[in-house]
Image: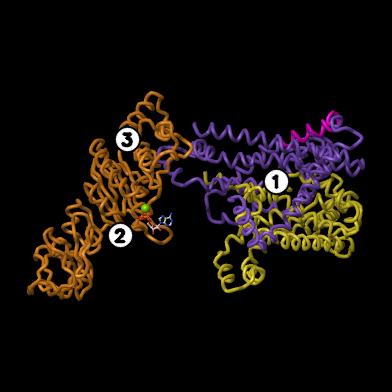
Chain colours: A orange, B yellow, C purple
Amino acid sequence: MAEVRLKDLTKKFKDVAAVDNVSLNVRDGEFLTLVGPSGCGKSTTLRAVAGLENPTSGNIFIDGERVNDLPPQKRHISMVFQSYALFPHMTVESNLAFGLKIKKKGPEEKAKRVKWAVELLGLSGFEKRLPKELSGGQRQRVALGRALVLEPKVLLLDEPLSNLDAKLRLRMRTELKRLHKKIKTTIIYVTHDQAEAMTLSDRMAVMKDGRILQVGTPGQIYEKPADVFCAGFIGSPPMNFLPGEKVPQVKDKNVVVGIRPEDLSISLSRIDAGIWGRSSVTETLGSDSYLHVDTSEGLVSVRLKSDQGILEDKPLWLVSHKEKLHLFDKSTGRRIT
Amino acid sequence: MRTLKFVLIGVVLFFIVFPLFMMTKYSISDRESIVTGGEYPEPFFPFQPTMEMFGLLWSRGDFLKAGLTSLWVGLLAVAFSLLLGAPTAYALARFRIPGIAILLFFLLSVRLFPDISAVIPVAELLLSRPFSLLPPVILVGLAHTLLALPYTVYIAKGVFESIPRDLEEQAFVLGAPKSSTFLKILTPLALPGLGAAAIYTFFLSWNEFIFAYFLTFQGTETTLPVYLLRILSWSPQKNFISAISVLICVPVIIFTFLVQRHMREGLTAGAVK
Amino acid sequence: MPGSIRISSLLLRLKSNLFTIGFFIPAFLYLFSFFVIILIFLLKFSFSGNLPLLSLFSSAEFKQALWRSLCFMGVGTPLQLVVGLLLALLIQRSFRGVGAVRSLFMIPIAIPALVTAIIIDLLFSYPFGPVNDLLLGRHGFFPQLVSVPVNWSGSEFLSLGLAILGKTWRDMPISMLILLAGLHSIEREQYEAAKTMGAGAWQEFKYLTLPLLTPAILTILILRSIENWKEFVFPFVLAPSYPLLGVLIERLYHVEQNPALAASVALGLVILIALTTLLFTAITKVVRRYLVRV
Ligand SMILES: Nc1ncnc2c1ncn2[C@@H]1O[C@H](COP(=O)(O)OP(=O)(O)O)[C@@H](O)[C@H]1O
Ligand SMILES: [Mg+2]
């Protein structure tokens, strides 16, 4: 249990800043996700917290203590790597016990903690297997267990689910969430998958080009994205963007208007406040259907109400409530209201 | 840790360079610097550096002759092993022969005999009629081909495998016969890679001692290493023997730096799976 | 008649690939005929000499040479492994100038073995030579360790030691390269994981590097032991008075003009190498199985 604080953290490789002046407070027991496109500096931030990268400038505090100069093992953190980094020559049991062995714990305590992890993660019966004899999901759980047996104050997870197939990934998501509820350790989680971030996090931090653009609960970021990038990155299918002057309710050419597909409704008769377009194709994603509409500003996607039939190649008007529009400054990209 | 590492690297580099430095030093030493009679230690740099020994070697016909012999043997070995090895490598790379592993094993198996064991039968064979009628240069060249051929095949196989098959099939579809496809399309593409095999073979031959020694034990025509050993048996001055050593080493060291990557491939061939 | 169909389709395949097969034959024939010739000669000589093979193996000269070869192999192999490992570890992580250092580490293998042996002979010459100068304390910077010059080539122990030294010096790049390939196949994240769990440099080496390097190490042990059994040049130059098997073969052939006897020893050497390889391969299997369960 601990809180983590990053203050003006910067990490440069040669002259390129992979992490650029990042400040962030992670609360005690919180599940915080760093989310952003690949190469935006998420892993580097996480590795700086772990002590695997030396920050170029800025400070890292764990439980109020400045840890910049502490080696990884003195920071009371554990890390799970994207490739899992299981030791290929050790059995599941030895992998789980490795950290305890290094920390010179007695055999009884070792056995107790390993047993705890095996039961927690449903690995019973696999203790004597080698990593190569396990499935992807099991390996993932061993990596998690190896981190947990050390009872870290902070658990760092770098894209732990990205090597799993789609179905397993969804299941492990739920398991992770349940696990966090149970152990209540502070978790910093890195992913490039916004859906994963939305479902897992207590709060998330959206990163781009080494900077944090917005921090907040998934709901806050979804409803009030701080800028165009966050607005477009979070949500699927992504938000539609239209120039201000083309939206009758706005009529301002210094503004970019963002509208989520579910906030648009379709009218087959002319509406003054509407945007004219022609229906193109319908796409069904499970329970929801989306209609792509050809407008003068390109394709706009609209979520169809369940009772709406498929309309193809028909002229139509798109409208939204004024308060559902997201307005962004055209030059800075920042949110206006 | 880091400093320890760099100190150790320094120590290792010292142990690698020091013998070479001493060899070079001896080769340019004056008499005074090597014949001390125990009155003073040998200096680490000659009192009066001189190129005298190199001049002497240049004027000696037997040294130049040995140098030329080495050169010819090397070139012969290169020519033989490429002519024999490249087509074989091509066949191995292109044609799924059943039991290819066994064939490869046989190709390499000749190298399983220790040189010092294999040299007895080879010498007995090549030094008896009709082979003994051939000039020694060719005999040694043939022996070195035997040593180099497995490596040539191994390296060249990799070269041909890296050339896309489509090229040949395209030529074939366009109606070119296989022989001209091989000569006009494949050979030019493979040339740089085969060059590496050629260089490897040349230096294997240039450095080889055992076969050359046994095959030219009696004649006057020898390669440089064997020449060096013969000189050694006269108990020569340190500077003279060092000058010959330097002249043998200089080309190899230069070329090692130029073709390091290919050398590494040759050295670890078959060892890293 | 499925059999004849299969044969005819095989013939067809052979025919359409005649060109390729024709390519394959010359080199194969060259190597294969030499292989057969060497084998037949060795066998014929060994069993046709007026001395039966068995009495050779009981002769004192052979026994001594065998013992020296065994020592050469037994000391040289682990030594070369350790030196190779040290070199590989030194240049495992990249740093500024690592390429240049690696190139310099490659130099010994480029130099002809004979030249290396001769340089060592010069350095350790008796009574006056650079190493004796050092040991006698003739240079101010080095303490005096002996009072009379050391006659290296006059002592069995020292001269064979020099031969091992020379062999190790020249062949260290080979072991280094194989181990380096092994080291580079270990993922960096595994080391980082160990580090976050508190492992220090020594523990990383003990628990990760060494076990994961075992296949490469076993490969080296096999290759090096073969190489050391058959060594000729270094002992030939540096320890001529104390022949080991390779040197004995040369002496029997050239000095005693007895090709039959030389071939017998040569065959003995081949057999020894085969046995050692089998032994090491068996050990490899056992060690692997054991390691996997640690
Ligand atoms: N060791 C390194 N050396 C040089 N550049 C690096 C290194 N590690 C990361 N980078 C660069 O820093 C940037 C951020 O990398 P990273 O933190 O791994 O991104 P993410 O995890 O968000 O995909 C990338 O542009 C990457 O190329
Ligand atoms: Mg990453």
Looking at the rendered structure, the kind of residue marked 1 is Trp
Q: Position of residue A138 (x, y in %)?
A: 37, 39
- Mark 1–mark 2 Cα distance, whole angstroms, equals 53 Å
Classify mark 2 as within 8 Å of ligand 1 or not, answering yes or no. Answer: no
SS assignment for the magenta stretch, majority:
helix
Task: List the residue tagged with mark 1.
Answer: C169
What chain does mark 2 sit on?
A
- Secondary structure beneath label 2: strand
Q: Position of residue A189 (x, y in %)?
A: 30, 47
Task: List the residue tagged with mark 2.
Answer: A208
- Mark 2–mark 3 Cα distance, whole angstroms, equals 34 Å
- Mark 3–mark 1 Cα distance, whole angstroms, equals 53 Å
- Secondary structure beneath label 1: helix
- Looking at marks 2 and 3 on the same chain, the residue that comes earlier in the sequence is marked by 3
Q: Is residue A299 magenta?
A: no
Give the residue displayed 91% in from the left and 55% down from the top.
Answer: B219
Give the residue displayed 44% in from the left and 38% down from the top.
Answer: A133
**Which-is-in-front pick, marks 3 and 1?**
3
Looking at the image, residue B178 sits to the left or right of residue C207; the answer is right
Which one is in front, A141 or B96? B96
Whether residue A293 is visible, yes or no, is: yes
Whether residue C149 is visible, yes or no, is: no
Which disc is residue A121 wearing?
Answer: 3
Looking at the rendered structure, the kind of residue marked 2 is Lys
Which one is in front, B112 or A121? B112
Mark 1 vs 2: CB contact within 8 A: no
